[in-house]
Amino acid sequence: MTDRGLAVVRAGTLTTVQDRGRPGHAHLGVPRSGALDAPAAALVNRLVGNPPGAAVLETTLTGCALRPRCAVTVAVGGAPCPVTVDGRPVPWAAPVRVPAAAVLDVGAADSGVRSYVAVSGGVLAAPVLGSRSTDLLSGLGPPPLADGTVLPLGRPGGRHARVDVAPQPAPPAELVLRVTPGPRADWFTPEAVRVFTSRTYRVSSASNRIGLRVDGPALERARPGELPSEGTVLGAVQVPPDGMPVIFLADHPTTGGYPVIGVVRAPDLPAAAQVVPGTPVRFMAVHRR
């Protein structure tokens, strides 16, 4: 067995392997998947000298603990959290050397939801359709981490960054999402469209990697009945019968039968990965380009 491995001591609430995902397979019913906060994942890879597409670990709220079988350089970013090596505090958002058999503990998020752990060489889970990402909806990729799992690591290919701490945006106190009109906006009353882009919603605790759910004023339909299933895209805002918008994230289904009232601009989606339940959400209408 190779000595370049990473043993999971504490898997946390939900820790998955993620990279830049597997775009281009929607016609096969395969979602894009990939890190929800892609800029955070790219930054920690850069900090340890990995290429941008190297696989990292994405934690959810409670972090994780890991024991490398060899000395590695790691960086933790995304949601701010305490980080220790064998109980000693080490910097967050900076490259840290972890000796073989030492325990790297990524603590619970102080703010935000998802932290990202990059390890020099990257995680070498078996790729599926060109990606090592875990997809919670389709089940493709490696399963979510469990205590005792050992992940293979690649060989380091570059030097780690020479920084003390890399600046990162704080998780938003209010999430503002720019939306263009969706393909089925005409399924809603004019008042519902006005409400959608003028009232404040709040993040629901039922959110996950598939979709960000929000609570607030229900959106009234102008038409009865349901749509035949049709293609959906990353950032689509689908409205089920209860009238509560759902923003599709990386593991979203590739088809859906509920009307899409709008589509969130892609640059606004990473912030959606870091909003905790109760965070205010506003949808801001923008013109098509």
Image (cartoon, helix red, strand yellow):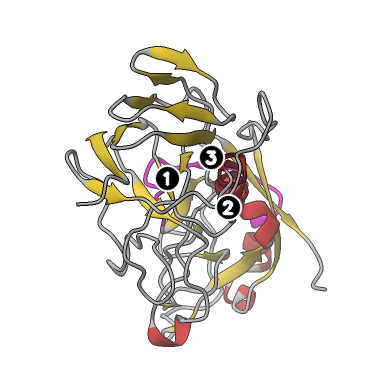
Camera-side residue: 140 or 129?
Answer: 129
Task: Specify the segment rendered in magenta.
Answer: 195-209
Return the residue at label 3.
Answer: 274
Q: Report the residue at 54% width, 60% height from top.
A: 53
Question: Principal SS element in the magenta part?
Answer: loop
Examine the structure image and report whether residue 39 is included in the region drawn in magenta: no
Which of marks 1 and 2 precedes in the sequence?
2
Q: Report the residue at 30% width, 68% height from top.
A: 140
- What's the amino acid at mark 3? Gln
Query: Is residue 217 positioned above or below 162 on the image?
Result: below
Camera-side residue: 283 or 99?
Answer: 99
Mark 1 surroundings: few (<14), some (14-19) or many (≥20) residues within 10 A: many
Q: Secondary structure at mark 2?
A: helix
Query: Is residue 245 positioned above or below 62 on the image?
Result: below
Q: Secondary structure at mark 3?
A: loop
Return the residue at label 2.
Answer: 38
- What's the amino acid at mark 1? Glu
Mark 2 surroundings: few (<14), some (14-19) or many (≥20) residues within 10 A: many
Looking at this view, name the residue that lies furthest to the top: 88
Q: Secondary structure at mark 1?
A: strand
